[in-house]
Image: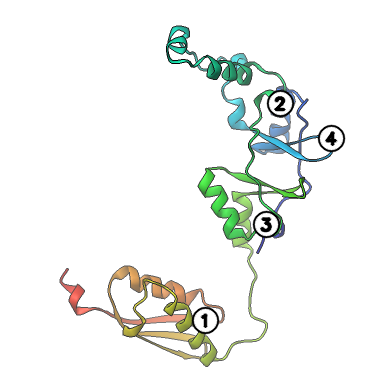
Amino acid sequence: MHARDVMVSPVITVRPSATVKEVAQLLLKHHISALPVVDDAGRLVGIVSEGDLIRRADLDTDKQRSRWLAALFGDEEVMAADYVKTHGRKVSDVMTKKVIAARPDMPLRDVATLLEKHGIKRVPVVHEGALVGIVSRANLIQALATDRKGLEIPLSDTQLRDNLLKHLQAQPWAHTLLLNVTVHDGIVDLWGLTRSESEKQALRVAAETMPGVRSVNLNLVRHSSQAGM
């Protein structure tokens, strides 16, 4: 699956000239936590989230910095930027301008990597500079919950066995020389030795998630050289 398969579209957006109050009202009205910011041509120029509105002078939640410490350590520029963010009344003053974005054809595993790597909850989807959708962590969970991917034509037991063995041989943690796999009517039996409990469970998961497998039986024994450890 790709970003375009799970993204929310059209997206509720806001202009850079909108006010902070208007943003707060939109977030509450639509029960969302962030809004992409677009220009008149629909190009993504930023994103404004609840996190951008937490530190506000009008809420008395802005950070209080020592003037003499700022002068001593040369933090006047940082303080000036903070002042704009905590006192500014327009979206352009408070929004995050460096936005992490995804492409419509980006695989979901890469979207998940973006969310995890950058510690963000959502990623806008952009095509040729224009905002076309947005994918959140919740959308990925929804895709997982409603996944209906299946096989139109059942695979033979021989094909299932070959696919599983090929998959395991590509895993650096699997000691396939110590294993055997038998398949009957879609039921997989794993036989042989494992080096650890973790490897045993990884073998189970690999078999269970193989398309066409109905169930898995573990007939595995802990390798004798590891048993006493």
Q: Are marks 2 and 3 in contact (CB under 8 Å)?
A: no
Q: Residue 59: give x, y in percent of width and height.
A: 59, 16
Q: Is residue 62 visible?
A: no
Q: From the viewer's perspective, is residue 7 above or below residue 190?
A: above
Can you identify the residue that label 1 sits on? 214
Quadrant that contains the C terminus:
bottom left
Q: Secondary structure at mark 3?
A: helix
Dot 2 amino acid type: Ser
**Amino acid type, label 4:** Asp
Q: Amino acid at mark 1?
A: Arg
Question: How many marks do you count on the picture?
Answer: 4
Q: Nearer the viewer, residue 214 or 178?
A: 178
Say above or below: 229 vs 160.
above
Q: Measure how far apart labels 3 and 1 are at the Cα level.
A: 29 Å
For residue 24, what is the image quadrant? top right
Mark 3 vs 4, N-terminal side = 3
Label 2 sits on a secondary structure element that is helix
User: Residue 136 location, x and y as percent?
Assistant: 63, 48
What whole-number distance in Å separates the C-alpha atoms at marks 3 and 4? Answer: 24 Å
Residue at coordinates 78% horizontally, 40% vertically from top-left? 43
Q: Give how far across and how far down residue 108 sits, in percent.
A: 61, 59
Residue at image point 76% right, 33% down: 14
Residue tagged 4: 40
Q: 26 left or right of 146?
A: right
The structure residue drawn at horizontal position 69% and vertical position 33%, both measured from the top left corner, is 27
Residue highlighted by disc 2: 92
Q: Mark 2 or mark 3: which is in front?
A: 2
Mark 4 closeness class: few <14, some 14–19, many ≥20 residues within 10 Å: few
Sequence-earlier tag: 2 or 3: 3
Quarter of the N terminus within the rendering: bottom right
* Discs 4, 2 touching: Cβ within 8 Å: no
Name the residue that disc number 3 marks: 3
